[in-house]
Image: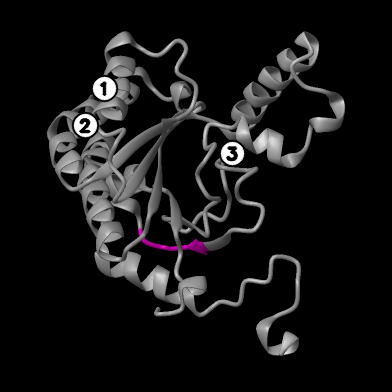
Amino acid sequence: MADNVRHPRHVAIIMDGNGRWAKERGLPRTMGHRRGVEAVRQAVRTARELNIEYLTLFAFSSENWRRPADEVGELLRLLKFFIRRDLADLHREGVRVRVIGEREGLPADVRNLLEEAEQLTIANDRNTLLIAFNYGARDEIARAMRRIAEKLVSGETSVESVTPELLDAHLDTAGIPDPDLIIRTSGELRLSNFLLWQAAYSEFSFIPCYWPDFDGKVFAEAVREYSMRDRRFGGLSREIAS
């Protein structure tokens, strides 16, 4: 992977399959989520080892609130546990934490903890870990459009200035390169309202293993397979162009 063009700067992961992993083992769904936290730690470590600058993890979608209250409570508890246990290590390793998603209406302790993680690591520049929490891509785009509409009404910007670049600058991921590779575990073949705008030219890898079984070896293989692809961005392949 010496060719930097073929090495992903940004990998985003839809972490799927915790519940099914637990069900197949006769365990409660909460046990799958707990094992999933260990897979998160492994993914963050592997991203550093593979020199991936940006890693985005889909931790909790805006639709996940529809799940049973005890499961939502467990997911929130595990998020808080992960940040409290791992934040110091992430900071020491030079990892910057950013959170994308809607924060209005979140429990105060969760919101404060997310903001604490961002503020503590704001000056770090080795890697960036984006946590997509209470996130939905359609909501993200709608919120960006509302901010642009407010600027149009106030006269701060003009209709002619509304471009893809302007919208991009108002998304939660402003300043972050689009994901080169999006990985989804569990074998499902959909985006589930994740990074719809940013995924315009992303490569995809749909991996059959459940998220608790996603380890460094599986991650590295997905990156290796990505490095063999010919990304054209609407142009010609390298072989044809040459």
Mark 1 or mark 3, which has the lower sequence index?
Answer: 1
Q: Which kind of residue does numbered mark 3 sit on?
A: Asn
The quarter in which the C terminus is drawn is: bottom right
Residue beneath disc 1: 116
The reply to whether callout 2 and callout 1 are in contact (CB within 8 Å) is yes
**Residue 61 position in % (x across, y down):** 47, 31
The foreground one among 109 and 72 is 109
**Residue 164 position in % (x across, y down):** 74, 41
**Residue 176 position in % (x across, y down):** 50, 44
Residue in the image at 18% along x and 35% along y = 87
The quarter in which the N terminus is drawn is: bottom left
Q: Residue 19: which quarter of the image? A: top left
**Would residue 208 be counted in the magenta stretch?**
yes
Q: CA distance from mark 2 to mark 1?
A: 10 Å
The foreground one among 140 and 174 is 174
Mark 3 or mark 2, which has the lower sequence index?
Answer: 2
Task: Determine crowd level at label 1: few under 14, some 14-19, many 20+ residues with C-alpha closer than 10 A.
Answer: some
Residue beneath disc 2: 83
Q: Residue 201: which quarter of the image? A: bottom right
Residue in the image at 80% along x and 31% along y = 161
Most extreme residue toward the front is 156
Task: Determine crowd level at label 2: few under 14, some 14-19, many 20+ residues with C-alpha closer than 10 A.
Answer: some
Q: Nearer the viewer, mark 3 or mark 2?
A: 2
Q: Horizontal placement of 200 versus 116: left or right?
A: right
Q: Which residues are magenta?
A: 205-209
Q: Is residue 205 visible?
A: yes
Q: CA distance from mark 1 to mark 3?
A: 27 Å
Residue beneath disc 3: 193
Considering only vertical position in the picture, is 42 above or below 161? Answer: below
